[in-house]
Every structure is written in C-alpha cells, then in structure tokens.
Amino acid sequence: MAENKTPKPVKEEAVATPAVDADAVATTPADTTAAPTPAVRRKKVKRTVASAQIHVLATFNNTIVTITDEKGNSLTSASAGGSGFRGSKKGTAYAAQVAAEKAITDAKNIYGVSKVDVLVKGVGLGREAAIRSLVNQKVQVESVKDVTGVPHGGVRPRKAKRN
C-alpha cells in the first residue's frame, strides 16, 4: 500500500541572454558623477498645540487617558496599566490620577498644551479622579462632557415562557 513517491525531473529551459557588443562596452566612458550623496536631514519642526481634547475612558478594569488635538489626532496617551499598576489596582481612582498626570505632563512638555476640553466615557472609578488631577496640573479646563454610550431601544427581549 505504500506508494513510492519520487520527485519528477524538472525540465530545464534555455534562457535567452541579450547579445552584448564588445566594442560598445569598451567605448562607453565610466560614469564618475554617480557617487551617492548623503541624505539631508531636516530638523523636525516642534509642533505647538494650544488647545487640546482629553479623552478619558474609565472602565471597571482600567483607565485610559488620550490627549488629541482639535481634529482628533492623537498627541499622547497613558493608561493605568502603563503607569505600573497591575491586576485589580488598574481600576482604582489613584491609578487613574497617576495616568492622567503622566499624560498631561507629556502634552505640556512636548506640545505646550494649555487649554483642554475633557471628554469622559465609561462608568469606572477613574472618572472624577482623572478630572481632578487635570485641574491640579494647572491646565485650563474649558469644558467637561460625558460621552458615555446610552442604549436606546436595546435588543429584542426573550420569548415568553410557556406554562
């Protein structure tokens, strides 16, 4: 029952090479101007963002703080997990406070952020703690808005039980 599978021989095809004229090769001058030039490095322009948005996502397990410009392009972000908290400690108010402080100090130092609009999403313990730490960091808070999703209508209910 064991079949002996041997590889089939591969057909070798002749590859046509273009004919090269020996006189044409000898008469062409060597190109000495093709020396590679080093790429010019431009200095990175430091971007300043005076007004920014701070998005706080506060879940039961973690708090994520993202700072964006007015268009929504991300500048910096920090989370309770990235700030050194692990396990159930990530969902605490203190972890949210540390994450918010880390994000806003980076934004102030790198981008010069001075005015912020705060958008809070979620139901975790870090909601108020993150906002409180932003006020303590001497950043002018223009507005605080809750953007937590609220279901309207919901899913279809289960069918009624039969007796």
Image (tube, grey):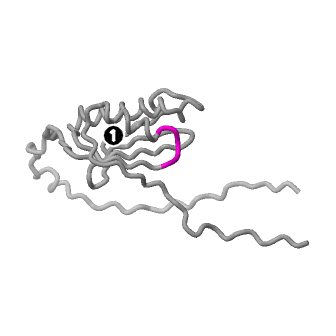
Residue 144 sits above or below residue 80 on the image: below
Q: State the predominant SS element of the stretch in magenta.
A: loop
Quadrant location of the C terminus? Answer: bottom right
Amino acid, disc 1: Thr
Q: In the shown orientation, is residue 86 left or right of residue 145?
A: right
Nearest the eye: 14 or 8: 8
Q: Position of residue 11 (x, y in %)?
A: 56, 61
Q: In the shown orientation, is residue 115 left or right of residue 15?
A: left
Q: Residue at x 26, y 53 (%)?
A: 70
Quadrant location of the N terminus? Answer: bottom right
- In the picture, residue 100 is in which quadrant? top left
Q: Residue at x 45, y 29 (%)?
A: 83
Q: Position of residue 31 (x, y in %)?
A: 11, 46
Residue sticking out furthest to the right: 163
Nearest the eye: 122 or 72: 122
Residue on which the image places disc 1? 76
Q: Residues within 10 Å of mark 1 (few under 14, many from 20)?
A: some
Nearest the eye: 163 or 107: 163
Nearest the eye: 96 or 2: 96
Q: Residue at x 40, y 41 (%)?
A: 65
Q: Position of residue 160 (x, y in %)?
A: 80, 72
Residue sticking out furthest to the top: 84
Number of numbered discs visible in the structure rendering: 1
Looking at the image, can residue 18 be seen? Answer: yes
Q: Residue at x 54, y 35 (%)?
A: 91
Residue 29 sits above or below residue 130 on the image: below
Q: Secondary structure at mark 1?
A: strand
Q: Is residue 163 magenta?
A: no
Looking at the image, can residue 38 be seen? Answer: no
Q: What are the residue bounds of the magenta stretch?
A: 122-126
Q: In the shown orientation, is residue 136 left or right of residue 63?
A: left
Q: Is residue 125 magenta?
A: yes
